Amino acid sequence: MISPIRLVLVTAFSNNLRGRAKYATQALPQLSSEKYDVKRKNFAKLQTKDVEHFKYLLGDERVLTDETDVLPFNIDWIKNCRGQSQVVLKPKTTEEVSKILTYCNDRKLAVCPQGGNTGLVGGSVPVFDEVIVNMMLMNKVISIDDISGALICEAGCILESLDNMARDHQLIMPLDLGAKGTCQIGGNVSTNAGGLRLLRYGNLHGSILGLEAVKADGTVIDCLKTLKKDNTGYHLKHLFIGSEGTLGLVTKVAIHCPVLPKAVTVGFFGVENFENILKLYRSAKSSLGEILSAFEMADYESISNTSKNLNLPNPISDYPFYVLVETHGSNEAHDEEKLTKFLTKEMESGLILDGTVSSEPKKMQTIWNLRESIAGAGLVKGYVFKYDVSIPQKFYYDLVPVLRKRMGDKAVTVCGYGHVGDGNIHINITVPEYTKEASSILEPFIFEEVAKVQGSISAEHGVGFRKPHYIHYSKDKTALQLMRDLKQLMDPNGILNPYKVLPEI
Ligand code: FAD
Ligand code: 2HG
Ligand code: ZN
C-alpha cells in the first residue's frame, strides 16, 4: 500500500454483473425489422432441405432449430434488437465454416456471424431470418510462444480464458473489457474492440499479428502469420479487423501478448470538475510515463447509479467526477515512488480531492468491478440509449449536460463515462422504455454535434445494425464508396451480415 491519501477498505462485490445483464423487464424486445422499419432483402428463405444439409455437415447436435433454443441467439445483450432466425449453426473447424458459407452463398441464404453476442450496436444478431453461425465451439488454443508473446487460437476462444492462459505464461492479453467473460477473440477482432487498456497496449490493428478468415464464397484466406514485420504487399488482415462480419468470418487469430506486469496499482479518485480531469490526465502522463496503463473517468451519475442499481459499494465518498488510474510496471519500488510523487503533488494542487489506492488484487478488482459494471447498470431501470463516441478531449464531456437538458424529465438518467485517454466517451441515457419520441430527441442530434467537432460516431463498439444510416457523419463519400467496392468484391451476393455497417443507397 502506497497511498499518501485516505485509504478506504473496499469489500469484495457479491454481485458481479459485468458481461451478464440484469434487466428491468423480461418482456421480449420488439422485432428489429418492425421497430426500425426495415425491408427484407431478396435472399432465399430457409427450407427443410437446407436444415438437412446443415445437419449432414455438422451433425444434428450442432444445428439448433427449436424456437426456444434459437431465441437467445436472436436477441442482443441490451435487449434492443430481435431477429427472426430459425437456425443456429455451431461449426468446430475452419473447413466446416467454409462448407457452410459455400452452401449459403450458392443458395443465397443470408448469414449472421456471431461470437459471444455482447456487441452493443445490434451487429451480432440477425434482423430477419439470417442463418446464425455461432463460433463458440471453435475454442482451441493452438500455440503460445513465451519468447515472442505470439498466441494463436481459434476465433471462439473467450477473452478471459485466453487472458488466464496467457498469465500462466507470464503474459497478458493486450485488451481487456467488461464483457471479457463472454466475448470471443473473433468478436473482438471483428469489432476492433478497444477497452480499458488501449491507452497502453494500443488497438488490435497493432496487436493482431495475423488471422485466418473465410470469405462469403467459402474461400479460406490464410494470413495467420506471427511475424512482427511482414511488408509483402497489402496488409489484408486489416480488412477483417473491425469489419463486423461483413467481409468474412474470422476463424483463427494470432495476437501479440505483452508481458505480465510485475507491479500493478489501481487508484480511484474524486475530482471537482471535468477540467480538472484533463489536468490530472496530463499530469499522470508526465509523472507516470510508460507505466500508465489506464486512465478512465466516470461522472457522479454513472457511479451512483451503478452503486445503487447493482448494489455495489463506492469505495470513496460522493464527488462530481471520478477517475480510475492504473499502472503496469516492472519494478514495484520504482512504480511506488512515481505514484507517490504524482499523488502527493495532485492532492496538494487540489486536482485530487480524495481517493483510494491499492495494489492488493482483491481491492483492485473491486474498483475495476465498479467501473466495468456501469455498462449494465442502466438496464435495471429501463431502456438504455448507448452512445460511444470519439471527441477531441477538450470537448469530451460537453455533450452530457446538453443531453441532460434536452431530455429533461423524459430520462431516468443521463451519464457520461469512458476512456479519457483515448478521447472516447460513453453516454448512456436511461428511459423507462424505448420510444420513437425519445429516439428522435437524441438522434441525429448527438451525431450532428459529434461531427461538428470532427469526432467519430463510433469510437469502439462499431456501426452494426444501429448506426449505418449515421456513418456519413464520420466517413467521407469517397471512403464509403471504397467500402462498398470492397464489399462487392469480397461478398458479391451480400450474404454476410446484411443490414449492418453499410447504409442502404
Ligand atoms: P458479438 O457481439 O457476437 O459480435 C460483434 C460483431 O462481430 C457482430 O457484427 C458479429 O457479426 C461479428 N463477429 C463476431 N464474431 C465474428 C467472427 N468470428 N467473424 C466475423 N465476424 C464476427 N467494446 C469495446 O470496444 N470496449 C469495451 O470496453 C467494451 N466493454 C463492454 C462491456 C460490456 C459489459 C459489454 C456487454 C460490451 C462491451 N463492449 C466493449 C462491446 C463488445 O463486448 C465488444 O464489441 C466485443 O468485441 C464483441 O465480442 P463478441 O464475441 O461478443 O462479438
Ligand atoms: C465500457 O467502456 C464499454 O464500459 C461499454 O465500452 C460502454 O455500455 C457502454 O456504454
Ligand atoms: Zn468502452
Image: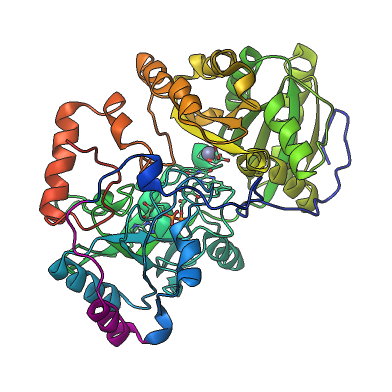
**Quadrant location, the N terminus:** top right
User: Residue 336 appears in which quarter of the rendering?
Assistant: top right
Q: Residue at x 36, y 70 (%)?
A: 87
Q: Residue at x 15, y 55 (%)?
A: 490
**Quadrant location, the C terminus:** top left
Does residue 63 appear left or right of residue 259 in this picture? Answer: left
Q: How many marks?
A: 0
Measured from the top left, where is residue 431 in percent x and y? 60, 31
Does residue 29 appear left or right of residue 356 in this picture? Answer: left
Residue 259's place in the image compared with 404, above or below, is below
Please name whichever residue, 28 or 130, is drawn nearer the observer in this view of the structure: 28
Measured from the top left, where is residue 34 in percent x and y? 37, 44
Please name whichever residue, 95 or 368, is drawn nearer the observer in this view of the structure: 95
* Colour approach in the figure: rainbow
Task: Report whether residue 423 is seen.
Answer: no
The magenta stretch is: 41-59
Measured from the top left, where is residue 151 in percent x and y? 44, 65
User: Residue 501 appears in which quarter of the rendering?
Assistant: top left
Q: Residue at x 50, y 32 (%)?
A: 435
Residue 271's place in the image compared with 74, above or below, is above
Measured from the top left, where is residue 299 in percent x and y? 67, 25
Within the magenta stretch, is there residue 192? no
